[in-house]
Structure formats: C-alpha cells, structure tokens
Image (cartoon, rainbow, N blue to C red):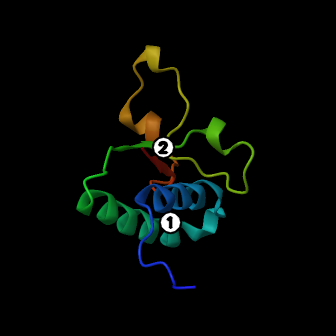
Amino acid sequence: MASRKTIKVEYVKERANDMLLKSADHLAEGRKAVTHLLESILHDTGNYRGFRYLTPNDMKDVQGSTVGINEVDFSADPTMEEKFDGTDSTRVEYF
C-alpha cells in the first residue's frame, strides 16, 4: 500500500484545536508553536476563518485550567484588563 501524500486541512485544524484545548497548563510554549503552524497552514490554503478565546466553561472538563478569556458580565462593559486578567493567550479555538 502506498503512503498518503496529502492530509486534509480540516483534520489538521481539528487535531490542533484538540491539543490547544486539552494540553496541560504548563505546555503554553507548545501551544504557541501549534498556533503559529496552524495559522500558517490555514492562511496558505485560504482556510483561515478566525479564532475565539477559550472560556472557563470550555475548560471545565479537560486537564488544563488556564483560559483565553475570563467570563465576565459583558453587559456591564468590562475593561480589556478584566476580560484578559490572568489569562493564557494560547487557549484558543480556530474556526
């Protein structure tokens, strides 16, 4: 059987998003590398659709506990500092 020479971009994105969500808190440098590689692939293939920061709700059932954005009452118009105080910029999900 011949080896595959291509891989679907959607599969790579799903695997990367899974790692960004489920990796241990101390692996932020690894998550940073994954985000750079994934963004490169998505831009180069015309598949970049943006991202969102992971919330405490996203993180409640996984190994990590750091979040990309704090859940605050957005109707109260929180400051940027309140939204991102103590957060981890590598906790993201790509669309």
Few, some or many residues within 10 Å of mark 1 (<14, 14–19, 20+)? many
Q: Secondary structure at mark 1?
A: helix
Judge left or right: residue 40 versus residue 53. left
Q: Locate residue 36: give its quadrant.
A: bottom left
Residue in the image at 45% along x and 15% along y: 76
Q: Locate residue 56: give its quadrant.
A: top right
Q: Secondary structure at mark 2?
A: loop
Residue in the image at 61% along x and 52% along y: 66
Which residue is outermost to the front?
A: 1
- Quadrant in which the N terminus appears: bottom right
- Label 2 amino acid? Asp
Nearest the viewer among 60 and 46 is: 46
Name the residue tied to disc 1. 31
- Label 1 amino acid? Arg
Residue 89 placed where, x, y %?
44, 54
Few, some or many residues within 10 Å of mark 2 (<14, 14–19, 20+)? few
Name the residue tied to disc 2. 85
Judge left or right: residue 9 versus residue 11. left
Residue 80 placed where, x, y %?
37, 35
Cα distance between the residues tagged 1 and 2: 19 Å
Residue 41 placed where, x, y %?
33, 64
